[in-house]
Image: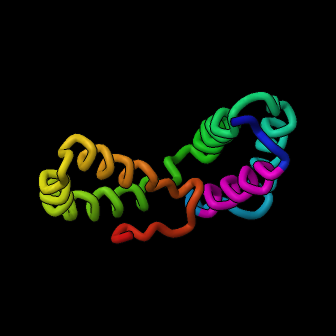
Amino acid sequence: MKTELECLPCFYGQISRTLNYAGVNGERARAIVRKAEKIIEQASLDEVPARTTTLIHRMLRDETGVDPYKQVKDTYNRIALEKLPSLRLLAAGSPDRLEGGARAAIAGNVIDFGIYDRIDLDR
C-alpha cells in the first residue's frame, strides 16, 4: 500500500484528534500543525501511510511533552481487562483455538484512537 492523496485528510484528522487529546489549542496548536505539515510535505508517496503517521505522532509527543492518549488508553485497557475472561472462553470454545485467540488479539489491536473517534468494543 502506498500513500495516496486520499490519505492527506486522514493525516490532518489524526493531528487534530491528537492535539485535542493533548489539550493543545490556539497558537501553540497552529505552530505544531505547521511542523506536521512539513513532515507531510516531505513524505514519500511511495511509502505506506503508517510511516508518515509514525513520524507525525513522534513529533506530536515531542512537541506536547505528553502522551496524548494516556487517559483513553488507561480507560480502554481497564475495559479490555474486564472483558478478558469472556474473551478467553470465546477463544477456547472456538473450533480452532489458535484462530479464536488470534481473532481476539486482532480485535484488540484495532483499538486505535489516532484513527478512530469511537470504538465499539462489543462489536
- Asked if 108 appears above or below 120 in the picture, the reply is above
Q: Residue at x 79, y 28 (%)?
A: 46
Task: Indicate the quadrant containing the C terminus: top left, top right, bottom left or bottom right.
Answer: bottom left
Depth check: 30 or 106 in front? 106
- Horizontal arrangement in the rendering, residue 117 relative to residue 73 (left or right): right
Q: Residue at x 79, y 36 (%)?
A: 39
Task: Indicate the quadrant containing the N terminus: top left, top right, bottom left or bottom right.
Answer: top right
- Horizontal arrangement in the rendering, residue 93 relative to residue 123 (left or right): left
Q: Main secondary structure of the magenta part?
A: helix
Q: Residue at x 66, y 54 (%)?
A: 14
Outermost residue, front side: 95
The percent coordinates of residue 60 (x first, y second) are: 64, 44
Q: Residue at x 18, y 51 (%)?
A: 95
Q: Is residue 17 magenta?
A: yes
The percent coordinates of residue 97 (x first, y second) are: 18, 45
- Horizontal arrangement in the rendering, residue 26 relative to residue 17 (left or right): right
Q: Is residue 78 magenta?
A: no
- Horizontal arrangement in the rendering, residue 84 relative to residue 102 (left or right): left
The percent coordinates of residue 74 (x first, y second) are: 34, 57
Give the quadrant of residue 48.
Answer: top right
Depth check: 109 or 101 in front? 101
- Asked if 49 appears above or below 103 in the picture, the reply is above
Q: How many marks?
A: 0
Magenta range? 6-20
The image's colouring method is rainbow
The percent coordinates of residue 22 (x first, y second) are: 57, 57
